Amino acid sequence: MITSKTQLVGLLGHPVSHSQSPLMHNAAFAELGLDFAYAAFDVEPERLGEAVAGIRALGIKGVNVTIPHKVAIMPMLDEIDPLAQRIGAVNTVVNRNGRLIGYNTDGTGYVRSLVEETGIDLREHVVTMMGAGGAARAVAFTLAEQGVREIRIINRSRERAALLAEHVGTIVPTAVIDPADGKAAIADATLLINTTSIGMHPQVDEMPVQADWLHPGLIVSDLIYNPLETCLLKEARACGARVHSGVGMFVNQGALAFELWTGQTAPAGTMRDIVLQQLTKTSS
């Protein structure tokens, strides 16, 4: 039951109707008996400033930030955590007595999930990454710090890809690849990561790369978690590649955000179970 003492948290994105965050976080709050409530807010880009002002005015405890606001929100905050500053994107905001502090839990959540679910040694891998937005920045920086051999970035905006490559390239060799040369950049890669929204509900039949670019020597990882198995992952599985879905990253980054807001250890198992139950239900 929501009362005058309930602390509100939520999600800022556009669109957000597909998000499992409210279900996941509210289940976690209920399990620990915390008087918190989580809601999703569909905020168009031109109204992001108003939404941030609303966080302050309403005393909202914190928010997750998703596509397309992870970079745009940064100058609107009072303080940026050093990791988020280095990444250049924010996915979690904490309201500490009226000061809005930005964090990034995406990269840590992603790498934790990838290693736990695949058992790979990242130091052995050549990575080709689709996209150069906020999630891509978090993933690229974290993979670089974990010592992958090389990162290749394919993005529609070469300027944005070049900026990311310039920063990540100070840690590991990083190249910008023209989309027309994508097949060659994937041919000798060992880890392909989709950080874009291509293939996300409701455009579930779309793919960020052509199916014949995939090969059995790949691990194909998609940050999208709705649908549970994207068209990209289906095609990858069909050609003999190993696959890694976005559910683990989603749960792990959410658990880290939960801990920033509440100061308590998140019930990650419950969070994962509730998301998988819902996604399985909607896909059947």
Image (cartoon, grey):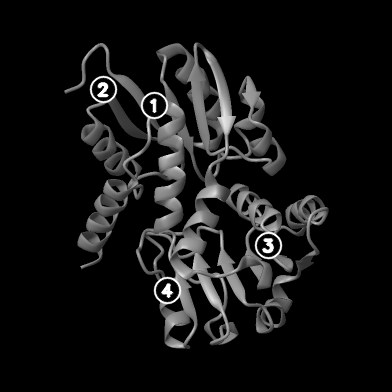
Q: Secondary structure at mark 2?
A: loop
Q: Amino acid at mark 1?
A: Thr
Question: Is there CB contact under 8 Å for labels 4 and 2?
Answer: no
Report the Cα–Cα distance between label 3 and label 4: 19 Å
Question: Residue 231 has which mark?
Answer: 4
The residue wearing badge 1 is: 262
Q: Position of residue 1 (x, y in %)?
A: 16, 23
Q: Which residue is mark 2?
A: 35
Position of residue 44 relative to residue 192, above or below, is above
Above or below, 16 relative to 46: below
The first of marks 4 and 1 along the sequence is 4
Please state which of the two labelled residues, at mark 4 or mark 2, is closer to the viewer.
2
**Label 4 residue SS:** helix
> What separation in Å lies between label 1 and label 2 (alpha carbons)?
10 Å
Q: Residues within 10 Å of mark 2 (few under 14, many from 20)?
A: some
Q: Residues within 10 Å of mark 4 (few under 14, many from 20)?
A: many
Number of the label disc, if any, that sits on residue 155: 3
